[in-house]
Amino acid sequence: MTERENSLVVVWSSGDREVALKMVFMYTLNSKLKDWWEDVRFIVWGPSAKLLSVDVELQEYLQKMRDAGVILEACKKCSDLFGVSAKLEDLGIDVKYMGVPLTTYLKEGRHIITF
C-alpha cells in the first residue's frame, strides 16, 4: 500500500459539539494512535472553526491529536469569515486556503471523510 493509499483526510465542518467529541475527534485521534492510517490529516472547515475557537475542551483534544502526529490544517477563507484565523494559528493549526490542497488530496487518491 502506498503512502497516499494509507492516508486519511478528515474534513470537519460541523458546528455540532457532540459530533466533534463523540465521533470526529475520537476517530481521528485513534486512527493515528492505533496505526489504522499512516498519514492522518485533520481539516477544520466552516462552522467548526468558530466552535473550536471558543471551546477549551475541543482545543485540548486537538492538542492530543497534534501530539500524536495528526497534521492539522484549517481553511483560511472560512476562519477569516468567522474572525478566528489568529486563534486557530495559536492552536498550532496550519491556516491556509484549502481549495487547492483538498483538490490535490482527492486527485492523489487519499481517503477523505467529512463530518
Image (cartoon, rainbow, N blue to C red):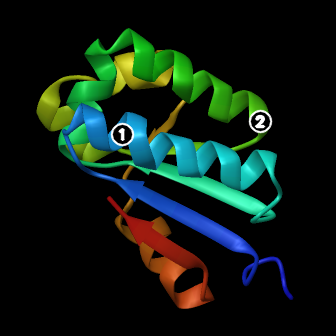
Q: Position of residue 108 (x, y in %)?
A: 61, 86
Q: Is residue 22 left or right of residue 46?
A: right
Q: Amino acid at mark 1?
A: Ala
Mark number, residue 95: none
Q: Is residue 19 left or right of residue 109?
A: left
Residue visible at 26% across and 23% down in the picture: 84
Q: Amino acid at mark 2?
A: Ala
State the quadrant of the N terminus. Answer: bottom right
Q: Is residue 108 left or right of residue 79?
A: right
Q: Position of residue 17 (x, y in %)?
A: 26, 32
* Of the two numbered discs 2 and 1 in the rendering, the one whose residue sits closer to the viewer: 1
Above or below: residue 114 compared with residue 111: above
Label 1 sits on a secondary structure element that is helix
Q: Residues within 10 Å of mark 1 (few under 14, many from 20)?
A: many
Residue visible at 64% across and 34% down in the picture: 65
Q: Name the one closer to the observer, 52 or 27.
A: 27
- Residue furthest left as drawn: 81
Q: Earlier in the sequence, mark 2 or mark 1?
A: 1
Above or below: residue 8 compared with residue 95: below
Above or below: residue 25 compared with residue 35: above
Which residue is label 2 attached to?
68
Occupied quadrant, residue 74: top left
Which residue is label 1 attached to?
20
Q: Position of residue 11 (x, y in %)?
A: 40, 58
Q: Position of residue 53 (x, y in %)?
A: 30, 19
Asked whether the viewer can see residue 92, the reply is no
Q: Are marks 2 and 1 in contact (CB under 8 Å)?
A: no
Label 2 sits on a secondary structure element that is helix
Above or below: residue 38 compared with residue 84: below
Asked whether the viewer can see residue 9, the reply is yes
